[in-house]
Amino acid sequence: MRPSDWAYPYDSSGLLQWFDPRTRIISAVVLTLTALIIEKPQLLLALMISATVLIVLSGLSIRQLLYRMSAIIIFFVLLLIFLPMTAPDFTMRSLQYTTALIPEALRIGLKASTVMLFAIGLVGTIEPVSLGHAMTHLRMPEKLVQMYLFTIRYFDIFRREMQLLHTAMLARGFRPSLRICAIRSYGQLIGMLIIRSLDRSERVLFAMKCRGYHGKFYLFHHFHFHRRDAVFMTLVMCAVTGIIILEMKP
Amino acid sequence: MHIADGVVSMPVLVTGTLFAGVGVAAGLRAITPERLPAAALVSAMFFVASLIHVPIGPAKLHLVLNGLAGLILGSAVFPAILIALLLQAFMFGYGGLSVLGLNTLIMALPGYFGYVLFIHQLRKTERRSKALLIGFSAGACGIFVASLLLFSALVLSGERYNVLASALFVSHLPLLLIEALVTGVAARFLWQIKPEILMESRPHETV
């Protein structure tokens, strides 16, 4: 069950793989919330550094990391361009660019990338099926988890199906463009994909019913909460408490 | 269409997440065990279809398809988009954990609006051109309302985002046209080839 080989690093072999997925999800949530409420730039920087350490521990390659951070980087550039334009002394006519709001943009960018790094390092490196498993243990709605598991199971199959149809279109002289006939072909491609996915879902449902499906997935293997998880959690909690105390201090 | 973490103010974030939670809960409630595979596979399909890139000048644009997803999934569009965003967050870095709820609301609510406004007309219509027009409106509604929600989330978070919000809103307008056309064609295609997909009691769900 691999969703896709090109983007999801579930076979990363970093140190973080030692920890229970539940530990990692809870830590990610706690650290994200902390990063959101922190306003002091020094503390944000400290959080950012700890997030970077976690990324190093997670064993992601630089390429994978840059790929995932590209959206944040583009967003950050947009912030740097547009935020200073809202400063009171900015005028469109002379295109006078003020630097007054640049620190603000930097702070927001720092916050956004810190939260993203926590998410990528701690949760993004959990093997997708284990993530679903952990979501069940964390009392997420069962149907949501089942939908998630179906999505990761069929993602790659549908991607291949789409490529198949797309190749067939290309072979018949389709050229991607914005002309009305190309748009019509895109629409029909998507319609066809939907019909195929519904047909497949029918077959899947029959097959599952034959195996006794009645709306529940049973779990046989359970996670174990080790001492190292307790140590990791304690470390995270201590760090978070320390940072919040420092933030409260005037 | 995605908001990054740490941008919107706390009240906006909390309100958005709460509303998204209500939507997801309602959507999940509507999915019976019989319907679950269909809803799940269609939502996986939408995730894949949103990877289709349309060239627009030198840039490439990826389709959102929330209008079409709304037409087909109804209220199940909320959990479908939540899962798509969860996967996108880890695979492409589009927004982290904290904005998951808000982004879900921004994209799923317009799809659901489109469903409420247009599905009855699409079911009733007899003419091909009208099916196209209804699909077009649903697609346009999907992107327009989503851009509007994005705009208001940013503006409500502080005056400093006014210019950024307007720029983002304007930059979504070309997408609106393409998305509306594609949704229109796809809706007409489904209406013509497999109209039972758009009906309330779908044959494949009452096994």
Image (spheres, rainbow, N blue to C red):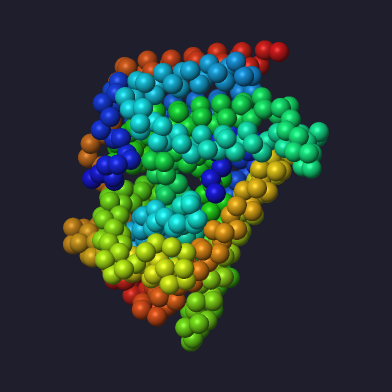
Position of A87 compared to A139: left or right?
right
Residue that protrudes farthest toward the left in the picture: A210
Q: Residue at x 41, y 32 (%)?
A: A66
Residue A123 sits above or below residue B3 on the image: above
Q: Where is residue A159 drawn, in percent x and y?
A: 30, 54
> Which residue is nearer to you in this view: B63 or B194?
B63
Q: Residue at x 67, y 27 (%)?
A: A102
Q: Where is residue B36 drawn, in percent x and y?
A: 35, 59
Residue that protrudes farthest toward the right in the picture: A89
Residue that protrudes farthest toward the front in the picture: A94
Residue B134 sits above or below residue A155 on the image: below
Q: Where is residue B82 drawn, in percent x and y?
A: 46, 49
- Quadrant including the N terminus of chain A: top left
> Which residue is nearer to you in this view: A78 or A104?
A78
Residue that protrudes farthest toward the bottom in the picture: B126
Task: Using the rendered view, name the quadrant where residue A231 is placed.
Answer: top left
Task: Using the rendered view, name the quadrant where residue A93 is placed.
Answer: top right
Q: Residue at x 57, y 34 (%)?
A: A76
> Which residue is nearer to you in this view: A133 or A74?
A74
- Quadrant including the C terminus of chain A: top right
Residue A141 sits above or below residue A62 on the image: below
Q: Where is residue A227 drawn, in percent x and y?
A: 31, 17
Q: Residue at x 52, y 38 (%)?
A: A74
